[in-house]
Image (cartoon, grey):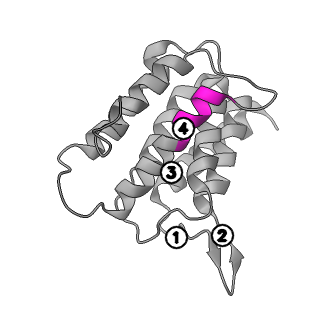
Amino acid sequence: MSQDAAERWSAAFSAWYPEERDTRGWDDSLGWLQAVAHGADAVAAFAKVLPHRRSDLLELCGRRVTVTQTDYRYVQLEDARLARALVRVLQEPELTSLEATGWLDLVAEALEGGGPGPVPLWAFNTFATLQSLHLHLTRGIADEGLPPHSEAVATRVAELLRLPYYWLA
């Protein structure tokens, strides 16, 4: 695939991914849909062919995980697929610590103002993804190891996870 083609595909994907509302993992009549998980796989692929777009891809994942218009709770490991994709994007050695953690500001902004009461589905999905990401950042991915800024990103993720889990050390 040419660089121009990859850029065109990436632009179209970036417009679609955070806007897709049908995020069901499985449908009894249609089978696997998994827009979130398959999109995460696409993010990881774009990170390989467009390494200069990694900051944009991190922000794109942040926008996907904080979409408030959902009636679907991640139950088919979408959170883990997003976490794996994020770690693969973070593998770029040229990313600065600020670039590696900056996209989490978008997540923090989305979570601002939450309080007591039931957790909205989108926030549940966000926290599930952050938990999975923290695990991936501390354990690494087989044959890929940990990204350069894994400790800084894991620390920022843990700060966000203290919002619902105030008892965490």
Q: Nearer the viewer, residue 50 or 155?
A: 155
Determine whether the residue tagged by mark 2 lies in a helix, strand or loop.
loop
Inspect the image, locate mark 3, and give the three-letter code of the amino acid beneath it: Ala
Q: Nearer the viewer, residue 2 or 81?
A: 81
Residue 116 at x, y percent in the picture? 17, 56
Which one is in front in this view, the residue at disc 1 or the one at disc 4?
A: 4
Boundaries of the magenta span: 132-140
Cα–Cα gap, marks 3 and 1 = 15 Å
Residue 151 at x, y percent in the picture? 51, 18
Q: Nearer the viewer, residue 30 or 119?
A: 119
| Tag 1–tag 2 contact (CB < 8 Å) | yes
Which one is in front in this view, the residue at disc 3 or the one at disc 2?
A: 2
Residue 22 bears which disc, if any?
A: 1
Q: Badge 3: few (under 14), some or many (20 or more) residues near its Cα, within 10 Å? A: few
Q: Nearer the viewer, residue 68 or 10?
A: 68
Inspect the image, locate mark 2, and give the three-letter code of the amino acid beneath it: Leu
- Left or right of residue 161, residue 109 in this image: left
For mark 2, what is the residue? 33
Inspect the image, locate mark 1, and give the three-letter code of the amino acid beneath it: Asp
Inspect the image, locate mark 4, and give the three-letter code of the amino acid beneath it: Leu
Is the magenta region chiefly helix, strand or loop? Answer: helix
For mark 3, what is the residue? 15
Cα–Cα gap, marks 1 and 2 = 8 Å
Determine whether the residue tagged by mark 3 lies in a helix, strand or loop.
helix
Residue 7 bears which disc, if any?
A: none
For mark 4, what is the residue? 133
Please tell me which residue is depicted at 67% across the width and 55% down the height of the picture. 38
